[in-house]
Amino acid sequence: MQIYLVGGAVRDRLLGRLVTEKDYVVVGATPTEMLDLGYRQVGRDFPVFLHPQTNEEYALARTLRHQGHQPGVVIAEPGVTLEEDLQRRDLTINAIAEDGAGNLIDPFNGVEDLNNRVLRHVSSAFSDDPVRVLRLARFMARYNDPPFTIAPQTVEMIRAMVEAGELDNLVAERIWQETSRALAEANPVRFFESLRELGVLGRIMPEVENLWGVPQPTRWHPEVDCGVHTMMALRKACELSSAAEVRYATLTHDLGKATTPKEILPSHHGHESRGADLIKALGRRLKVPSGFTDLAHRAATYHTHLHHLYELKPKTVLKLLEGLDAFRKPRNLEWFVLVCQADFQGREGFEDQHYPQARDLMRAYHAACSVDSKQLPKGLIGPMVGVAMRQARSAKIAAVLNRVKQQQECQQQ
């Protein structure tokens, strides 16, 4: 029996990154031998065992064998070699093993690809699982400094997979799993840009793909293209927040612009409600968690309200806060403001401009929250209490907006 450290732990150590999980492959052992040593078996598809002390995963060396045109069969038996096990892995940088003495076993030149910052498939088996394409794009988002490139042969293979329709039937949960993980990486923009360059984005998220090529008024969007703006906004959102929900809402906030009637372009009147509908549909199709869809839906619906905050009546600002459910869920407001700031600053030439609307909406919110039901007139019952509360909150918001207006007038003089 021989035991090797494999996969991400070896890769990340060689990259100088923190190793948080370790996986091992065991060559020359049977399930019975592992159980006799005190390992606990988990998983049904192939033998994986948990170490009795560390709970780290130890998998028996396995390979995938095909018979004619039948689906491959996973073989995990003592005769499977380490190289056979490594050959079934997706990328060369994940097909490096390390023995107990610290020696590297690298039959597919993964170390060289690490040094050259290249993502390359190990073998034709890469195409057996289309999810590997999304995982590759996620690595593009993770390893960003300096960035990786994709080997030309791998690009060619993926484009052939796309043309053959192999990515058209990906399970929704797997698409969302990789997308949500990518949103939490260092540079999610590279995930979406890589998928677009490979011809994949339009197959799994056409609502996002369709933004490219759609023009916007140059006065407000010097970058013009909606897809370019979306990526700029997403990049800014990543600077503002590590929350994947904020990043997803930023990614989808302008989906409605892709469905703007051609005769009114480059204007996008009504894109907010159209985008909100698309977000709901996208969420149902990919089984996006409700928390992500809810924030994205609110951001698409209301983001232009915040951009035009100083033109709104106090009652309209209150409706905005109520629409965000801010009084029950303050985080909704905090995240919404970040999405709007990312949208505002995610434009060519606006990247470092101040966005006072974010500060002033928070001031208006805190003022509205200061209203105490004990301060309301005595004797109110039923719906009258709610009416009085809304009137008091509107008055507080009006006071804040008036002060802001006065300050702005003073600064202009």
Image (cartoon, rainbow, N blue to C red):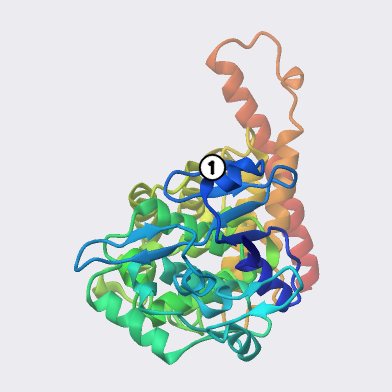
Between 151 and 235, the residue placed more toward the observer is 151
Residue 260 as seen in the image, left or right of residue 362: left
Residue at 45% x, 83% y: name it. 224
Residue at 50% x, 84% y: name it. 223
Residue 170 as seen in the image, left or right of residue 29: left
Amino acid on which disc 1 is placed: Val
Q: Quadrant of the C terminus?
A: bottom right
Between 45 and 289, the residue placed more toward the observer is 45
Place of residue 240 in the rendered image (x, y in percent of width and height, measured from the top left): 69, 64
Q: Mark 1: which secondary structure?
A: strand
- Evaluate whether residue 56 shows in this view: yes
Residue placed farthest to the left in the image? Answer: 69
Residue at 39% x, 50% y: name it. 283
Q: Which residue in the structure is indicated by mark 1?
A: 42
The picture quadrant where one finds residue 209 is bottom left
Place of residue 302 in the rendered image (x, y in percent of width and height, measured from the top left): 50, 52
